[in-house]
Every structure is written in structure tokens, then in C-alpha cells.
Image (cartoon, rainbow, N blue to C red):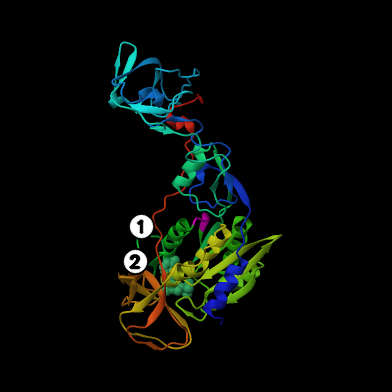
Amino acid sequence: MISYEKARNLVIEKAQTLGQEKVKLEEALGCVAAQEVFSKIPVPPFRNSAVDGYAVRSADTGVGEQPIKLKLLAEQPAGEYFRKKLGRGQAVKVMTGAPVPAGADAVIPVEEAEEEGGCVILKRQVHPGENVREAGEDVAKGTVIIEKGTVLTPPHLGLLAACGFNEVLVYRRPRVAVLITGNELCRPGERLKLGKIYDSNSTILQALIRTSGAELISLRWVKDDLKSMTAAIKLASARADIIITSGGVSVGDYDLVKAAAVKAGAREIFWKVAQKPAKPLAFYELKKGKKSAWIFGLPGNPGAVMISFEEYVRPFIKKCSGLKDFWPQEVEAVLTAPYRKKRGRLNFVRVKLTQTGNVWQATPLSQQESGIISSLAQTDGLALIPAEADLLPAGTKVKVHMLGWGRTTKPGRSLGYEAWGRTTGK
Ligand code: AMP
Ligand code: MG
């Protein structure tokens, strides 16, 4: 049996990025940028108006000559380009986003001027630069707009689009296959037969994988028999970078994942970690040419599944995805109640977190057994109670790994431009 620290390091040292690929912006949400991106153009690309108004020469609007009357040369909507230079005493009507013609250096809002017989009458003096957006004031040409390793969020994607990119180079998402073992399992939605329980791990794992940024490529139920399990591992390893198995990794008569992994050609990196829950956690490498599929054998209890995922699988996925910051987010918290345990194994204790000022308080939930699923739903974090500890009095400082997965959506199909009702690029 190895320590938690040793096990997590063994896992993370195997995690490597899986190559790079160009993806359409519509598919890049949540991906990790694989290179720095420079803007090839200034944004905005040209000097333009920040308001609907009249582009003028500010020098024509000096004090003493009010009301100022300027000759209206043209009207310029956004998207059009007025090529003439504005002369003395002249103005051009411009809409927000329209280019500010050469010669003009300011725009007076439409609300502060009036049109009359081909002229525009200004109600006040205009200062140089007023309501003019300079070319490149948002993004100068050559600026780094995306750093390597950035998780692409909606504004990052918008920034890329504003600079004219429709694709971005990202690290390939890890592909994950899930194998669910347990002859006692029954599908949710079906009638529960005597002796059976509903399979919750399929659902937990699918959801966890979705929040991790990895791609779930398959999920299968496998019978607790060596032949089926071996075949399932072999099949999954063809495409998957990561195989997650649920259940069957302990010492029971029907715990066949380990034997099947070896039969399928995998090598054990570790089995059994001095932790509670998830002591029988197993980690294997299945070589396939130059690449490998990594097998995480998770014990079947839902608490063990979740904790193994958060402490081992998610950091592994993150590092494979190109992220530098892959460990769980850790805070220090003060126990609000004593915690008693046996010496020997690190305990992951489900806690509720509260905060007073800068101090976090961790309150252990009443049910901690690895088969208990209900208290998982109330867990804010996992307090790490060291292996050698036996009784921690209230007030003891402990490390807590925060849980929290934000809100993710299923990666959708790209809609493309047709969906806007536009077929040409004009
Ligand atoms: P195992 O690791 O296969 O020995 O399973 C440990 C415990 O977890 C047993 O009580 C199983 O019935 C339970 N278990 C295994 N797989 C699942 C699953 N997919 N959903 C819910 N409970 C499970
Ligand atoms: Mg089982």
C-alpha cells in the first residue's frame, strides 16, 4: 500500500498532453490554447465613431462662433467608407461604428446637433478626439491576445473572432471510456428487482467527465467475468486515452478488474492507497505502440468513485489537457468539531464550509461512509485528515480540497453562418 502523496505523484507524472489540433471557435469553448496567438490586425481596424452623430473638424467648432453651422457632405452608415477628406466647415453624418473620414477628428452626438437645409447646426464646441475610437485602441496589431495554456472562455473566443480568426490551436481533449462493473446493478428508470441496486456511478462519472473538459467516448456495462472484462478493456483501449472502471477492484471473488487489466496487457503502477475512502484504487498503463491508455480502477462505492475522480482522475485529465494548474483547489480551514479516526490512512472527510472574515471553518457531515451518496450532495469540500492522526480536536487547522464544478453545457454542434440567415460574406 502506498501513500496518497506517492500515488497522486505517480499519476500526475504520467500525464502528458495528447497533441494539438485546430478547432473552430464554435467548438473551442473550454479547450486549452496550445500556442500564443497574436493579432494580425488592429482592432478596431480603422478609426470609427463611438456614437451616432456628425464627424467634424474640432477646430471648426471653436468658441465665439456659435451656433456653428457646417455643410453636410454625406451620410455614412457603418460598413461604408467615405473616401473624401473633410474640408473646413464640412461635416459627415456617421453612425456608430462607421469610419471617421480623413480630416475629421471628433464626432458630435446626434442629440446635440440639428440638421437644416443640407447643413448641420452644432449646439456646442467639440473637443479633438471626442467620440472617436482610434484604430488599434482595443487591440494593437501584433499584441498577444491569447496566452498559451489559457482555458478558452466566451470572451476569449470573442476576442479571437474580433481579430478575424475562425479557428484556434488547442490541446486535444483526453478521450475517456467508462466501464461499469457489478452484476447487482439495475438501470435507473427500470423496476428494481430483489437484490439489485440502481447504478449511480454511470451517472456520476458521466457528469464528472463533462465537468472536466475530457471527452466521454463510451460507457459500457460489463459483467463480472474475466473474459468480458478483458475484452471490454481491450476494446476501450483502442480509442481511449483514459479508461475508468467502476467497481470490481477490491479483494472480493468477483473483483476481476485487476486480473482483466493484466490479461489485456496492462502493467500495474499501483494498487491500494493508504486512504479512506477508495483504498483499493488501482492505476495501470496499457501500452499501445508509442501511446498508452491509462486505466483508473475505481472502487465501486459512490463516495470512493467521486473522491478518486477529484483527487486523481481530474488532475490527470487537466494536465493531459495542457493545464499547468491541475491539483484540487486547496484552502486551510478550522475544524468546528473534533474528528476521530484510526491511524494509518489519510481520510478524506466530507465537510461543509463557512467563512468568517478570512477564516474558513470546516464542519464534517454526519455520514462519511464510502457507500453513502446523500451526504456527497451536501459536500463543499474534502478535509484531508493526515494518516498518522487519530483524534483532531475542534479548532485544528486542516487542508480542504474544494469541490465545485460550475455549470457546463454539452459541447454542441457548430451552427455556422447559415444559422444567422446569411449565406454570403458581404
Ligand atoms: P465493488 O467495488 O464492486 O466491490 O463495489 C463496492 C460497493 O459499491 C458495493 O456495495 C456495490 O454494490 C457498490 N457499487 C458498485 N458499483 C456501483 C454502481 N455503479 N452504482 C452504485 N453502487 C455501486
Ligand atoms: Mg462489484
Instruction: Tell me where residue 17 sits by quadrant.
Output: bottom right
* Residue behind mark 2: 377
Q: Position of residue 102 (x, y in %)?
A: 49, 23
Q: Check the image and name the residue furthest to the top.
A: 117
The label shown at residue 181 is: none
Residue drawn at 37 percent across, 14 percent down:
71
**At numbered mark 2, what does the secondary structure look like: helix, strand or loop?**
helix
Q: Position of residue 295 (x, y in %)?
A: 58, 66
Say few, some or many: other residues with alpha carbon within 10 Å of mark 1 (under 14 / 14 to 19 / 20 or more).
few
Instruction: Give the vertical position of 37 relative to 237 (above or below).
Output: above
Of the image marks 2 and 1, the number of the one nearer the N terminus: 1
Q: Nearer the viewer, residue 62 or 24?
A: 62
Q: Nearer the viewer, residue 221 or 109?
A: 109
Q: Position of residue 192 (x, y in %)?
A: 35, 64
* Residue behind mark 1: 189
Q: Nearer the viewer, residue 272 or 24?
A: 24
Would you say 250 lies left or right of 204 here? right
Say whether residue 182 is visible: no
Instruction: Give the vertical position of 273 relative to 373 (above or below).
Output: below
Q: Is residue 215 magenta?
A: yes
